[in-house]
Image (cartoon, rainbow, N blue to C red):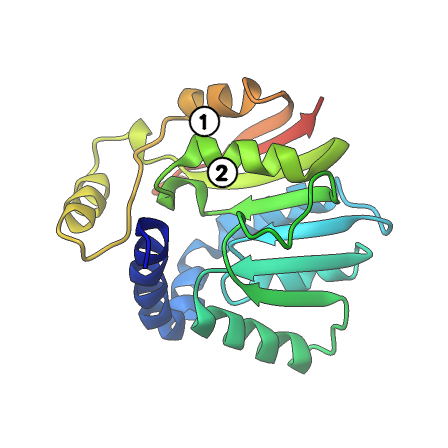
Amino acid sequence: MNNCDQKMSKSEKFWDKRAIEYDRNEKKWEQTYNKALENTKRYLKNSDVVLDYGCGSGILTIQLANLVKEIHALDISSKNIEAAEQRTKGNKVDNISYTQTTIFNDRYKKESFDVILAFNILHLLEDTPKAVRRINELLKPGGLFISETASLGETKSFFRFLMSFLSKMKLLPHVVALKFSELEEMISKDDFQIVETEILGQTMQTFFVVAKKL
């Protein structure tokens, strides 16, 4: 097993354990998610082929499905994928396909997506700039990258300290304390033009960004 597979295995095990509590925890941030959802809807068209990077249990994926042609949703956790498939079936949605994998899977071809979504995942990656470059590679020219990211670097709160400590103790996966400015600069320099930004939430601020591939 190579290093990449080992990291994926560790993260997969963590998120598999969290999958049972995922929906309950999502409700804590319901107001922020709803705002991100409404912002995202304004940019979607019924002809769009969408990639949902880090789909979790499919809560947001399903709510956007009727606005686009199809969604290819991926997550590292098999338990999240199982939960998402069950929820999708229960909601009688038929234009979402789920895969347990990473965004670097060769099944995803260059310039094959109109929109790529990345909600609450960029701050959990070992190499966020590499992931952003991959997103740019997969988008069609003029395609949109829409993300919402926890910006732990903006505060010295106990929550930030706790997240960092638990990550170092290997009780959480890798966590990056990104600042709004760092995230915006990271996206901008990878052949993206920033279209919209908004700071969401109060207790736990997140950064909503829409960027267009040049």
18 or 42: nearer the eye?
Answer: 18
- Rendered view: 117 above or below 199: below
Viewer-closest of 45 and 48: 48
- Residue 124 in view: yes
Kind of residue at badge 1: Leu
On the rendered structure, is 2 left or right of 100? Answer: left
Residue at 28% across / 46% down in the picture?
174
The residue at 80%/48% (across/down) is: 48
Residue 183: assigned label: 1
| Depth order, front residue of 182/189 | 189
Local SS, label 1: helix
State which quarter of the image contains the N terminus: bottom left
Marks 1 and 2 sit apart, C-alpha to C-alpha, by 12 Å
Name the residue carrying label 2: 131
Foreground label between 1 and 2 = 2
Q: In this view, does 66 lie to the left or right of 118?
A: right
Q: Residue 209 placed where, x, y %?
A: 57, 32
In the figure, is residue 15 to the left or right of 39?
left
Q: Position of residue 70 (x, y in %)?
A: 77, 59
Q: In which quarter of the image is the C terminus?
A: top right
Q: Residues within 10 Å of mark 2 (few under 14, many from 20)?
A: some
